[in-house]
Amino acid sequence: MKNFFLAILVLGLLAGVISAQQRPDSTRTLHVVATSHLDTQWRWTIQETINKYIPATLRDNFKLFEAFPDYTFSFEGAFRYMLAKEYYPRDYKRLEEFIATGRWRVVGSWVDAVDTNVPSPESLVRQALYGNGYFKREFGKTSADVFLPDCFGFGYALPSVAAHCGIKGFSTQKLTWGSSVGVPFDIGLWEGVDGSTLVAQLNPGDYVSRVRNDLSRDTTWTKIVMQQGETSGLYAGYHYFGTGDTGGAPDSESVVWLQKSLHSDGPLQVLSVGSDELARSLTDEQKARLPRYKGELLMTRHGVGCYTSQAAMKRWNRKNELLADAAERACVMAAQLGYPYPGEELRDTWPRFLWHQFHDDLTGTSIPEAYQFSWNDELWAANRFAGLLEDAVSAIASCLDTRVEGVPLVVYNPLSIYRQDIVEAQIVFDRPPKAVRVYDRNGKEVPAQITARDGKTVTVVFRAEVRPVGFTVFDVQPSKAPCTLETGLEVTATSLANEHYSVR
């Protein structure tokens, strides 16, 4: 009898050991990100996105929240939230509740899921400023990642730009579609041009993946997690599932299996998380042990041809980037002189063209009908920025000493560098002169000539030198004889040459 009870005790202890071994090890985790990829414009226009895809994304996920208490959903693009607020205010109120409880995660940090190759670094900074800025104002939350499941390649500057905006992570599944460098790692550090890094998840599976088994026991993901742990000490995996490209929500069967996986006793601990949660959770020590990649992550096949399409769209985008920057700098200077700073107008205008940097819009892969809306917004933003710039420059000019012998002409250099460039200006004279002489602020003559006449309006071209982010007053004086300054320019019937170039 004594031996019998001893045997029972031993068996009980062994059962406890086996049970402990079967319990999920908290260091072996699979981070599962439910998402719904939505192309703001692609094979449809923004109208269809507003009328169908935005409400479907909201309401389909609300149903899943009600049915599955552990379901967490990630959705990027502050612009889509702006549309929801404007067109579906009742749904937006419910959305606020789910965001407050952490069920719906605001991710991606940006105004929209934009291309990263055409926009300037300043635009990418503004994407974060206005994207996370909106999330903060509306929900009291911000995102910590660049969430780009779909895009056509990623430039070397992205980690540096993102890190300087306080962003910690980056994820995409696009590299499996034809990366020029392969997939450097599953989870690691992507280093930018200045040494800044992002925690990058580069092989999470397709964003339209479905879940059809217990992920805590999935042999493929178990192997991936173990390989990641053996190479970096971080026993973790990162897995997308969901739907695309028309919004909506993951299928309910996938969420049923996710729910089972979360409460299973397999070797992996499955977590239903926001897309930025892994990047937020890692310590500096853990990051230091991760594999590291430094360089571009460009594509060889998918989407690469789009960078030569829709040239007008790319031109308007670049014009607005430059115009917005010039307007803001001038407005800051005018504010220092006592004029009101038009902060609200600038904050309202930037997103109007930023959302068109979406990776199917600016790149040129959307249907022709979409560009009616894109060009309209680009032109609207250009007119708004031009008006703000004109008002600011006029205010500054009114404070300058413009007492000259001829016609005072104020030249603005919005660049942060000392600049020597050619300026063209149209000047109205009471009596149009045969020629003009132009003098700088020190009274020194600069090369100048008249290139066109239209009644009393004369088009003058001259060489101007202006300090960084500065204004200079030039004196345009009527003259009987043209400027005779030596410019170093030599012109013949078959050649052009100056101190820099010789063209034949």
Image (cartoon, helix red, strand yellow):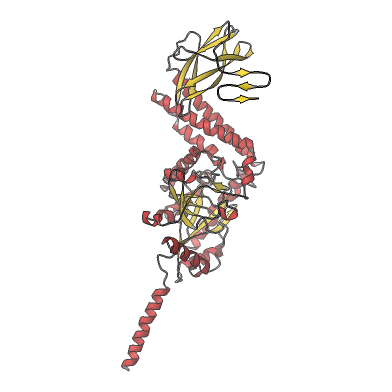
Residue 224, position in %: x, y?
Answer: 49, 64
Farthest residue, direction left: 2
* Quadrant, the N terminus: bottom left
Farthest residue, direction top: 480
Farthest residue, direction right: 493
Residue 207, position in %: x, y?
Answer: 56, 56
- Vertical arrangement, residue 330 with respect to residue 20, above or below: above
Residue 457, position in %: x, y?
Answer: 60, 13
- As rendered, which of 51 and 408 lies closer to the eye? 408
Residue 212, position in %: x, y?
Answer: 56, 67
- Vertical arrangement, residue 19 with respect to residue 308, above or below: below
Q: How many marks?
A: 0
Q: Residue at x 47, y 53 (%)?
A: 200
Q: Is residue 143 visible?
A: no
- Vertical arrangement, residue 72 with respect to residue 421, above or below: below
* Quadrant, the C terminus: top right
Q: Is residue 468 visible?
A: yes
- As rendered, which of 372 and 223 lies closer to the eye? 223
- Compared across the picture, whether 132 is left or right of 423 comes to left
- Vertical arrangement, residue 418 with respect to residue 315, above or below: above
- As rendered, which of 349 and 327 lies closer to the eye? 327
Q: Residue at x 50, y 63 (%)?
A: 67
Q: Residue at x 37, y 84 (%)?
A: 11
